[in-house]
Amino acid sequence: QVQLVESGGGLVQAGDSLRLSCAVSGAFNSYVMGWFRQAPGNDREFVAAIDKSGGRRTHANSVKGRFTISRDNAKNTVYLQMNSLKPADTAVYYCATLSPGGTNWYDWAEYDSWGQGTHVTVSS
């Protein structure tokens, strides 16, 4: 079974940057990868996703222009570079693998393996 381990979260001030990493075991280059986040009291929210080769990616409107998803298939790792952070970005961030039959990158229910999450707190 694939295992995912996120890292890189922390407490920062508004306007700062963070880079999240997600190390994945198994056949990493066979997975579409996604990042999601969940703030207290809120539903899990799509942040970004990237295809198996890294040639196609998409970002939520709320983070477009500030966050960038990327992957390094040689290192079995997917990244989320977060710039110009805002207090509204405060959440637990999760990486996940799209299930083999999954087609909707934006729907968390189509992802079948998840990491434990990493906390990001942005103070104003």
Image: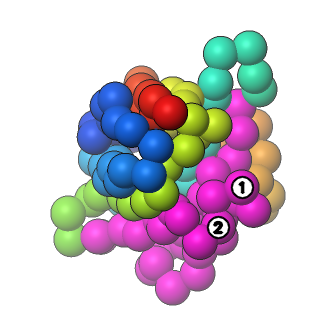
- Neighbour class for label 1 at 10 Å: few (<14), some, many (≥20)? few
- Judged from this view, the residue extending furthest toward the bottom is 55
Q: Position of residue 97 (x, y in %)?
A: 53, 48
Give the left or right position of residue 16, taking residue 69 as reference. left
Q: Residue at x 78, y 46 (%)?
A: 107
Q: Are marks 1 and 2 in contact (CB under 8 Å)?
A: yes
Is residue 113 visible in this depiction of the protein?
no
Q: Nearer the viewer, residue 110 or 62?
A: 62
Q: Nearer the viewer, residue 123 or 101?
A: 123
Q: Residue at x 39, y 38 (%)?
A: 13
Residue named by callout 1: 62
Q: Residue at x 28, y 40 (%)?
A: 8
In this rendering, the answer to whether 50 lies above or below 119 is below
As shown in the figure, which amino acid type bears the numbered disc 2? Lys
Q: Residue at x 34, y 29 (%)?
A: 11
CA–CA distance in space, label 1 to label 2: 6 Å
Q: Position of residue 3 (x, y in %)?
A: 35, 36
- Give the structural element (helix, strand or loop) at label 1: loop
Give the left or right position of residue 51, taking residue 108 as reference. left
Give the left or right position of residue 10, taking residue 103 as reference. left
Q: Which residues are magenta?
A: 44-73
Q: Position of residue 112 (x, y in %)?
A: 61, 38
Q: Nearer the viewer, residue 83 or 1?
A: 83
As shown in the figure, which amino acid type bears the numbered disc 1? Ser
Residue named by callout 2: 64
